Amino acid sequence: MKTSALALTAPALIVLAVAAVAAPAFAHHAFNMYENDRYVTLTGTVKTWTWKNPHAMIDFVTDAKDGKAETWSVECSSPNIIGRRGWTMESIKAGDHLTLTLHPMKDGSKYGLTVSVITPKGETLKDKD
Amino acid sequence: MTSTSRSILLAAALCVAAVGAHAAEPAKAKPKSASMGTKTIAGMWALEKSEYDRHEAIPLKPEALARQEAARKAREEGGVVLSANGKKCLPIGMPTFMTNEFALEIMTAPDRVTLLSENSTLPRSVYLDEAKHPTDIEASWNGHSIGHWEGKVLVVDTVNFNDRVGPIGNAGVHSPTTHLTERIYLKDPDTMVDEMTFEDPTFLTKPWTNVHSYRRLPPHSELWEYACEVDSPGWSERYAGDPEAKLSK
């Protein structure tokens, strides 16, 4: 692995990337609490970027609309998975302003599954469909 | 004639004969395998997502469908996020070994094919030197696999799954009565396919086939580590809603 982050203290459950619609009994991790057919695109600034198993995580604050900014937590796939698709520990850092597309939670909380990120360098990084 | 010159003549004659024999063969269509060059299923692979999600519903028996629905409700409405096995860092088992998105390494030897998944604590072995499954072994997470080559297609037969996984997942079934047949081959030099056919008289109304495609990872790719540490700090806060999640600081 390119970085040592994976080998260090990886807080991890066994992650199974599974089809969104038919929530499987095999999976450790359910995805049917997300609106997997809905896409929300936000722009904002990264508070923290966590490159760890079982999930990389982006915490960010949206650009204020009508004076209101929102704090979101967005979950990415395991670094083992997205690390093979062009993501690295260096892809994102705190303070980056980026465009993030996600599947939101069904319950309306400010949490989602990462679909894609456009970094300040203009690079598009993809995760879930 | 000396023995040396006779040997040379003989060798030369054999070479000519060999060349002649080759040239004399009628032109044939190249077998599909020839277009793969020297590449085989050995190497490092990753599941292609676009194929992964695209399969039909499993033909489940009514009891099995009801069980699936109850499990779905528990997850969606009961706040269950972590599976029992996930909480204990238990092996993922088959078929998930082959159907998750973590890197897969395949090693081929004359008597067996060995597979490693970043997401599995257990390797998977396909024995090529056994015609029949042994009858006196314990049921297991990956089942017992025997196989043979049909040309460049690895045909794998797996039985003897334990009852610790599933039994029903979106990628297949895993139960003591499951019989899984796989056909694993290269579609092109950098694309591998695993056609999985599940038969299970307990849960399925008929055999069910799904097909997974894998892309070859770049040369010199390595298996990355993945450590399952259930009680490590730093968990996403939302898992705190899982009735069985125990988070420690």
Image (cartoon, rainbow, N blue to C red):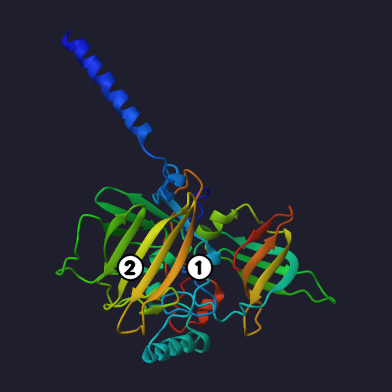
Question: Which amino acid, by three-letter code, is at mark 1?
Answer: Tyr
Label 2 CA crowd tier, 10 Å (few <14, some 14–19, many 20+): many
Locate residue B140: give its quadrant: bottom left
State the count of labels. 2
Which residue is at a point 15% across and 69% down the rendered structure image?
B135
Q: Position of residue B173 (x, y in %)?
A: 37, 76
Residue mark closest to the camera, 1 vs 2: 2
Q: Is residue B179 above or below residue B183?
A: below
Residue B137 location (% of width, % of height) = 17, 68
Pointer 2 chain: B
Q: Amino acid at mark 2?
A: Thr
Q: Nearer the viewer, residue B130 or A70?
A: B130
Question: Which residue carries the number 2 mark?
Answer: B181
Question: Residue B184, how many percent across, how many down?
Answer: 38, 59
The answer, for residue B87, to whether it is visible in the render is: no
For mark 2, give the secondary structure: strand
- In this orientation, which residue lies closer to the viewer: B149 or B175? B149
* Element carrying mark 1: helix
Q: Which mark is residue B52?
A: 1
Q: Residue at x 27, y 59 (%)?
A: B147
- Out of B21 and A58, give the one closest to the viewer: B21
**Marks 1/2: CA–CA distance:** 18 Å
